[in-house]
Image (cartoon, rainbow, N blue to C red):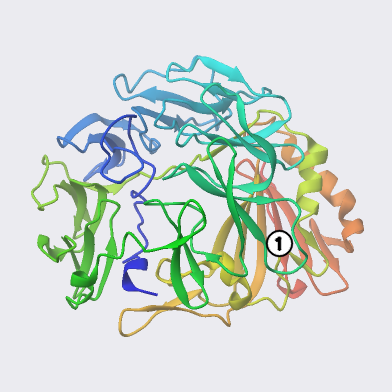
Amino acid sequence: MTKVSQHILPLVLALLALLSACNNEDTGGYPYRTRYLPVQLAGSERWSLLNVEIGEVVARDSFATSPSAVVCDMFYVQQPDGTYNFYNVNDPMKAVNSVPYGSVTSFGAEGYALASTRGGSLMLIDKQCHVVKELAKDIAQGSMMTRGRIAIEDDRGNWGFIDERGEVVVPLEYANVNAFLHDDATVVFAHEQDADSAATFMVIDRNGKQLYSASTATYRLMSPYYSSGVLPAIKGDSLVCLDHSGKEVANPNANHAAVDSAGYDDFTRTPAGLFLVMKKGKMGLVDKDNKVLIEPTNDRLFDITPTRYIAMNDTLCRIVDEHGKPVGDATFVHAHGSIDNVYASRGFIDLNLVTASILSMFGAGGACGASPATTLMDMNAVVGEDARPLVGRNTLTVPQGPCIVQYLFNNDIASLQADSTATFNYGARVMAVSIAVNVSHCATDVEQAIVNRLSGMMGRKGFVFDRDGMFTAESGTAVALGYGGGNVNLYYYMNRNYAQPLPRIMRK
């Protein structure tokens, strides 16, 4: 793997991708154009909005909790009762929606989002929170809009895409799909797959036309997203790039020879084609010819647009331009630019379907593809290629449909070496698996109802009641059931001797 495929550090601000933008603007290689950034100013416990183009603070100290990322001038704030209100940066204190939403996605650059009220179906809404179209009642969840497409899933686990009108443009016939994030082509998987570990993936365009198909036995995907017109994959021991026809082509981002030979401790390419570099623990910015734009004197440096960066020193952050010159005089300690709500679900729930979905994810011998003997090496395809973001962590989180699955290992997933490289600890073993389903948009008694149904069906999975909401199997595994914070929680223990009861906390 070349240095350019590594990341300098986990980008705790998560500012690289889905940020504030509007259509038809020069984004310099970024998916969206960033204008506003939620920040916690130095010396304040409340949140404000910062115009990163001019450095001006908007709605100073107006929010007790962090607003979401600002996309196309729209953002949401979660209310104390768990519902959501949308706001526009031009009137940031007045909710746009008249009725609180139980579930939402962030707005896409096109100016549309998905939302649902408690008890209602998913709706496609515009920036005035007017309903463009109410989706069919069997649509269980949908994604944030990217490049004019929203991925939707029905009750039977079939995925497809709708457009800005809410019309189906890619039929719901796939087991798994990925967003059209940077490109008008993306990777999808069919339901019917061979029994072996290899799978066939297909690449489709925005209208569902299949461009080509290939096997993961030949191409191990580094990412399901096309970027700069290519799909990166590992073939044998080499990095290759596939174009829209599946042909192997030259890597369009392989222009870092001058930076690679400069002796930096590490570097990573920005979407605008510049390079964040690290030298002796400090970060700076250079171009592809290694011309220094920002000297490596910052504790941390994060790119948010081609001409705006967050420079962090002594825990304080400020906005600087591509030459390191301060933009405005605001200093802050935290920023929130990540997209938290990528998926929204309808405001009602089919208890039978949810229970069956959770039950399908585990058995007496293991859960979510992991067993008592599973190591990190066995999960290499899920972990990916970059060890650095996982240094010092012993948990790995993987969304699976409406569930959030977290694998807990008996050791750190990755370690930092003396030469500043990061390596995976492939012998780390899965100790437990957590499965969580968010039902905060539903009635407050739903959590207990789902837990009751799961408890009544545990015998079908080979488990018997033990104590305090826990069940054990002859294989030595155990399951604990609970809920809290609007989530139904199932904890699967590979060794029942370590099993602990889960709390059951009702929502108010």
Q: Secondary structure at mark 1?
A: loop
Please name the residue shown 32% across and 45% down the image.
Answer: 30
In the displayed structure, would residue 266 be above or below residue 249? below
Please name the residue shown 50% across and 36% down the image.
Answer: 144
Quarter of the image for residue 270 reads bottom left
220 horizontally vs 443: left or right: left
In the displayed structure, would residue 2 be above or below residue 138? below
Quarter of the image for residue 496 reads bottom right
In the displayed structure, would residue 217 be above or below residue 323? below
Disc 1 crowd, CA 10 A, few/some/many (<14, 14-19, 20+): some
The residue identified by callout 1 is 368
Identify the image quadrant of the N terminus: bottom left
- Residue 367 pos. (x, y %): 73, 63
- Residue 205 pos. (x, y %): 53, 41
- Residue 487 pos. (x, y %): 64, 44
417 horizontally vs 256: left or right: right
Quarter of the image for residue 282 reads bottom left
Please name the residue shown 59% across and 38% down the image.
Answer: 208
- Residue 89 pos. (x, y %): 31, 25
Viewer-proximal residue among 165 and 12: 165
Please name the residue shown 34% across and 39% down the image.
Answer: 32
Viewer-proximal residue among 181 and 115: 181
Q: Amino acid at mark 1?
A: Cys
Q: How many marks?
A: 1
407 horizontally vs 112: left or right: right
Can you name the residue that lies furthest to the bottom here?
Answer: 418
In the displayed structure, would residue 407 be above or below residue 417? above
Identify the image quadrant of the C terminus: top right
